[in-house]
Image (cartoon, rainbow, N blue to C red):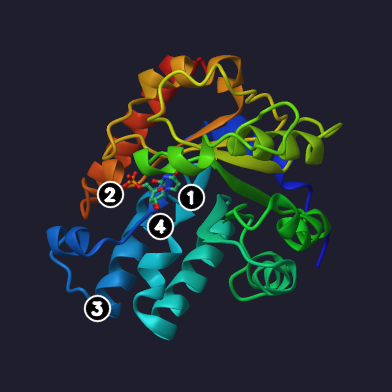
């Protein structure tokens, strides 16, 4: 297997070619029902196949939400494995939203699951949680580098409950930085010197309003969920991200998926979001 270019470079090229939009694949029970599908593996499979057929060749990045596939056990995981392979075959990048995080020795196994090139669930990037300490993610950072993959580390999540942990000030930090600022600083260090873009990104919600008190200039991508069902819009992006907006990957799941199962309607919705993003950030 030939080595992959680093994820950051592949992401930059994909964003240049297809625009920065990320479409999330979140087969909620309510969406299956709205699409006239049963809440079972057949429904899951049909839902996922429809999204892939409609969008895989048009959108730069997909973010399957692992939880909605894990819900169905091994047969759900089989649908996820197939989806990741098909999306990648269509030239899209896949960010597996599995939000893994554990002590380093276990983190190695999570990294092997998603970032080892011949693994059944191999994806271009993985979302990870730094709340066992950023250093606990080292096995994933190392394997991502080796495999040409990326990570998206939870920094400032889109949900309002995140602030109590992420904006807490670290008593032992001489600079009095917040937890999120510390995570962002680690990411900037891991991306130092990389061009055109580092491979280690942050998850930063588009819902959060002005973030100018945080240094988002990490030379890495900023995955921005929260657009659509959670209330943020593409027009909010410049005010939230400032200069760093050039590295934002805006992510929409239900906002697009609710237009299915009609293929043309799914495409039209993704194109509308892509146009709005372009208009907002000039991408
Ligand atoms: O801070 C975060 C991190 C991840 N998510 C995930 O993104 C999608 C959002 O779905 P929508 O339907 O567009 O609201 C979902 O998979 C979340 O688990 C997030 O929302 N916020």
| Other-residue count near label 2 (Cα within 10 Å), few / some / many at <14 / 14–19 / ≥20 | many
Confirm whether residue 24 shows in the render. yes
Cβ of disc 2 within 8 Å of ligand 1?
yes
Q: Is residue 194 left or right of residue 83?
A: right
Cβ of disc 1 within 8 Å of ligand 1?
no
Q: Is residue 165 left or right of residue 30?
A: right
- Give x and y (percent) for residue 201: 64, 41
Q: Is residue 244 left or right of residue 52?
A: right
Cβ of disc 3 within 8 Å of ligand 1?
no
Identify the mark nearer the N-term, 4 or 3: 3
Residue at disc 1, secondary structure: strand
Q: CA distance from mark 2 to mark 3?
A: 18 Å
Q: Say if mark 2 contacts mark 4, CB within 8 Å.
A: no
Identify the mark nearer the N-term, 2 or 3: 3
Identify the mark nearer the N-term, 1 or 2: 1
- Give x and y (percent) for residue 259: 21, 45
The front one of 121 and 274 is: 121
Identify the mark nearer the N-term, 1 or 4: 4
Q: In the picture shown, does residue 268 fall above or below 38?
A: above
Q: Say if mark 1 contacts mark 4, CB within 8 Å.
A: no
- Residue behind mark 2: 257
- Residue behind mark 3: 40
- Residue behind mark 1: 62
Q: Say if mark 2 contacts mark 3, CB within 8 Å.
A: no
């Amino acid at each position: 297997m030939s080595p992959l270019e680093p994820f950051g470079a592949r992401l930059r090229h994909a964003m240049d070619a297809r625009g920065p939009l990320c479409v999330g694949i979140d087969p909620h029970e309510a969406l299956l029902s709205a699409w006239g599908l049963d809440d079972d593996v057949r429904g899951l499979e049909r839902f996922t196949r429809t999204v892939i057929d409609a969008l895989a060749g048009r959108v730069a990045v997909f973010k399957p939400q692992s939880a909605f596939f894990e819900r169905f056990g091994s047969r759900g995981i089989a649908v996820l494995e197939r989806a990741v392979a098909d999306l990648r075959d269509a030239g899209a990048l896949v960010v597996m939203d599995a939000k893994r995080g554990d002590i380093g020795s276990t983190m190695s196994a999570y990294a092997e699951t998603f970032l080892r090139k011949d693994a059944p669930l191999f994806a271009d990037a993985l979302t990870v949680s730094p709340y066992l300490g950023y250093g606990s993610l080292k096995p994933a950072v190392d394997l991502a580098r080796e495999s040409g993959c990326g990570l998206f580390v939870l920094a400032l999540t889109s949900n309002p409950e995140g602030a109590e942990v992420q904006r807490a000030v670290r008593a032992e930090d001489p600079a009095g930085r917040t937890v999120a600022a510390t995570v962002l600083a680690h990411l900037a260090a891991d991306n130092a010197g990389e061009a055109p873009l580092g491979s280690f990104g942050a998850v930063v919600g588009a819902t959060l309003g002005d973030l100018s008190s945080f240094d988002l200039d990490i030379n890495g991508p900023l995955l921005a969920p929260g657009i659509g069902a959670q209330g943020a819009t593409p027009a909010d992006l410049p005010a939230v991200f400032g200069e760093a907006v050039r590295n934002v990957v805006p992510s929409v799941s239900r906002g697009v998926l609710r237009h299915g199962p009609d293929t043309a309607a799914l495409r039209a919705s993704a194109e509308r979001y892509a146009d709005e993003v372009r208009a907002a950030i000039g991408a």
